[in-house]
Amino acid sequence: MTADTVLGSWRRPPLSVASVPPKSNNGTQRTGSTSNLPHMKVLSMPRLARGKALLAGIALVYALIVFTTSVTCPFASSDAPSSLPVSHTTAQAISTASSNGNASIAIALKTGAETMAARAAIQLLTFLHNEPMLLVVAERPSLSLGHLDVRDVYTDVYTRAAKRIKDGMDRRIEEERGRLDALDGNTANSEEGNAVIEIANENDGGIDAGVNNAADGAGMVELEVADISFSDKKRKRDLIRRAAVLNKESVVAGQKLKTKGWTLDAHKNLPAFQLLYETYPNADWYLMMDDDSFVFLDSLRAYLSAKNPDDKWYLGQKNRFKGCDGVKEFGKGPNFAQGGSGIVVSRGAMREMMRAIDHCIVKYRECWAGDIRVGLCMRDVGINVTHVAGFHGVPPNADFGFPDNPCERPFVFHHTTPAQIQTLYDTTRRRSLPTFADIYTHLHKDVTATDLRVMKNTDVKGKVLKGKGINMTHWEECLDGCIGERMCVGWAFDERGVCYYKKGVGKFVEKEGRWGGVLIERYQCNTH
């Protein structure tokens, strides 16, 4: 077979004006710079040679395509569909995470129709922008956020859960009928058979009566301020406002604003976890987060990679509650992971929760908080929350007390503003696993060490280095003493003439008559 047979009627087109080599000053065409170009060498070949070269090029491209497909899609076969399913991206993400020794995390970003544009957009532009296993969930259908479809996890949630429970009971009734038939051949009409069916239908009727006769979302407890408090130890803080000190900015909690999105928020957590597991059943870990939270995902993956995802882990900031499940005093009910700080569930724990998820959705529909509902459901399947220090319920602002250990790494900050999210994201661009030292330094990048070293009418809250104060005559003596004490990071001098050396930077509080400051150069982590 000749090249003409393969190429058919193809002939080299005449050179266009643009492709004619330029002429030299003496009228001859220049060949020095163009004849060495690859395309000019091909055009100068005889026709048969050109055809062979073209065929060789086609064969090379085809071989590269086959090789690339076999490397990136090792599961591909001759009968595979022409277009890969959406789950291929998930499979790649899980495979990549596993090969890198990192945990794969499926994420549910919980938002509301009223807040998602103002809050969630910055999350998708920063730390969530490259996450392949991500669902955005809210309380209404037909919502979008950028290129993402927002999934409705509220509409008809109780009707659908009750139907799944009823369908499951119907299956068990039929299975029981079959078992009895196998025992006696006609036991379905026996006393034992009728008793089983009667009991099952009685339970079924109770679910229908409790759910289908009420509109979804009805029956919610009217919340009072006392009911929605996580702690009865709240106190007002008046903090110093200076250029050298962090401001007190944070997102106002939806429970204070009483937005519709927050009122319906309690109904989202359990069905959102259900949808997340159905969408990504093979993920190692599952994270639920709020639209005003910042998550250090690389740090969280590194932490989770040391744990077995098939064990039953329920992780977060441990909290107590009252006002649900008959609990009237803090500490009388099970502990739960506070939702805004992030709820992390392992694959093993998620499988257990999914066995009871529909029953939990129906059973706890009047509980006022979704994260408490998750804790109650976990209690029902025998799993307790494990407290993890890196999940924080407040942003790193003036109210936040930085830990004494500068090498600690945070995982989540809650109630962060868009500006704070951008700032925290910037720290991860400088260091993928930032410590508190990195964050503190970056937050104070616009002030000098001198600004932080000495401040009037300022107290530094934090642990005292030697457990007690030292009598001194002047604040300068206190500062000099801190500088001379190698382990001293902060200092405070009160109006009584007592000096306190501090183990860390803590936080600044405005206090008339006091002096204080921190040596920021000592709040560093040297183990990177």
Image (cartoon, rainbow, N blue to C red):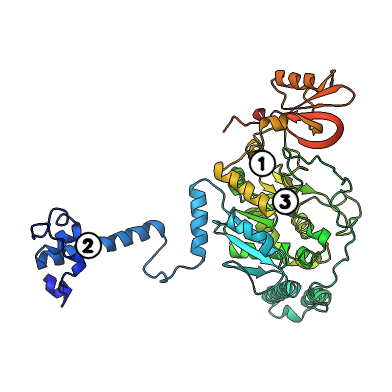
Between discs 1 and 2, the one toward the N terminus? 2
Q: Residues within 10 Å of mark 1 (few under 14, many from 20)?
A: some
What is the x, y in percent for residue 157?
A: 73, 72
Residue drawn where x is 16% and y is 57% of the image = 34
Q: Which residue lies furthest to the front in this view?
A: 25
The foreground one among 327 and 495 is 495
- Label 1, label 2: how far apart the Cα atoms are: 56 Å
Of the residues tagged 1 and 3, which is closer to the observer? 1
Secondary structure beneath dot 2 equals helix
- The disc label shown at residue 443, or none: 1
Would residue 51 appear left or right of 286 to someone viewing this image? left
- Label 1, label 3: how far apart the Cα atoms are: 17 Å
Q: Is residue 471 above or below residue 74?
A: above
Q: In which quarter of the image is residue 107?
A: bottom right
What is the x, y in percent for residue 31?
A: 12, 56
Between discs 3 and 2, the one toward the N terminus? 2
Secondary structure beneath dot 1 equals helix
The foreground one among 521 and 414 is 521
The amino acid type found where label 3 is placed reads His
- Label 3, label 2: how far apart the Cα atoms are: 57 Å
What is the x, y in percent for residue 480?
A: 74, 19
Q: How crowded is mark 2: few (under 14 residues within 10 Å), some or many (20 or more)?
A: few
**Does residue 463 show up?**
no
Would residue 284 appear left or right of 333 to someone viewing this image? left
Which residue is under mark 3? 414
Q: How many marks?
A: 3
Q: In this view, does 150 lie above or below 254?
A: below
Secondary structure beneath dot 3 equals loop
Residue drawn where x is 59% and y is 65% of the image = 279
Q: In which quarter of the image is residue 79?
A: bottom left
- The disc label shown at residue 230, or none: none
Q: How crowded is mark 3: few (under 14 residues within 10 Å), some or many (20 or more)?
A: many
